[in-house]
Image (tube, rainbow, N blue to C red):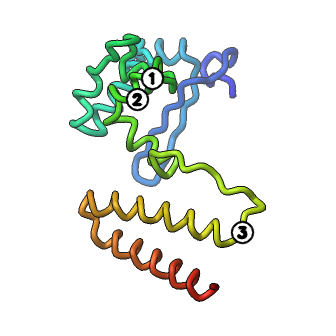
């Protein structure tokens, strides 16, 4: 999309103004946006991530100041780049990594994959093992309703495996 002002450069700044039911959009290149609005400060990606994280949670304020003593990487650099600097970062940034890993991988511990040729019994046993770990985490977090649901699912799986035998 071309800039609506100079009609030369690619539009990279998009303003949306909503007043009542009326919506007005303006698409400008960075140069025209600076000239017309004077509101575009130069910010780094690190500053953007830092501000987003600070707004998200007050608890992460300490994490933002954390740097790995081994490789010197900061948590903000990790969030901006998406890669850790060394093995020590897993321990140093544990508070921020744990929720991220749980969200991405549905857990923080690698449990492997079940081969496609494995039978239903092996899959059921692996599911029971996974659920027991999840049950332990739910009890530790005092999420008792969730724990009860997991307990019931484990019971169903064990009863169905007993019935199959």
Tag in front: 1 or 3: 3
Disc number at residue 77?
none
Residue contact between numbered discs 1 and 2, judged by CB atoms under 8 Å: yes
| Residue 133 sits in quarter | bottom left
- Disc on the earlier residue, 1 or 3: 1
Q: Secondary structure at mark 2?
A: helix
Mark 3 vs mark 2, CA separation in Å? 35 Å
Task: Give x and y (percent) for residue 84.
Answer: 47, 23
Asked if 144 appears above or below 34 in the picture, the reply is below
Task: Give x and y (percent) for residue 119.
Answer: 72, 69
Asked if 118 appears above or below 85 in the picture, the reply is below
The foreground one among 141 and 23 is 141
Residue contact between numbered discs 1 and 3, judged by CB atoms under 8 Å: no
Q: Residues within 10 Å of mark 3 (few under 14, many from 20)?
A: few
Which residue is identified by label 2?
A: 90
Which residue is identified by label 3?
A: 119
Mark 1 vs mark 2, CA separation in Å? 6 Å
Which residue is identified by label 1?
A: 87
Horizontal side, residue 126 vs residue 114: left or right: left
Task: Give x and y (percent) for residue 75.
Answer: 36, 23
């Amino acid at each position: 999309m071309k800039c609506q002002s100079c009609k030369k450069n690619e539009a990279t700044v998009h303003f949306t103004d909503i007043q009542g039911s009326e919506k007005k959009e303006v698409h400008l290149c960075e140069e025209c946006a600076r000239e017309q609005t004077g509101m575009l400060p130069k910010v780094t990606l690190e500053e953007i991530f830092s501000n987003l994280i600070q707004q998200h949670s007050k608890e992460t304020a300490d994490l933002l100041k954390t740097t790995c003593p081994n490789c010197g990487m900061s948590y903000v650099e990790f969030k901006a780049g998406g890669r850790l600097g060394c093995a020590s970062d897993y321990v140093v940034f544990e508070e921020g990594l744990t929720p991220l890993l749980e969200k991405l991988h549905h857990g923080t511990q690698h449990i492997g994959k079940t081969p496609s040729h494995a039978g239903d019994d092996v899959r059921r046993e692996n599911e029971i093992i996974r659920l027991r770990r999840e049950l332990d985490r739910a009890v530790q977090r005092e999420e008792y309703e969730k724990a009860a649901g997991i307990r019931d699912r484990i019971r169903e799986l064990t009863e169905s495996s007993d019935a199959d035998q």
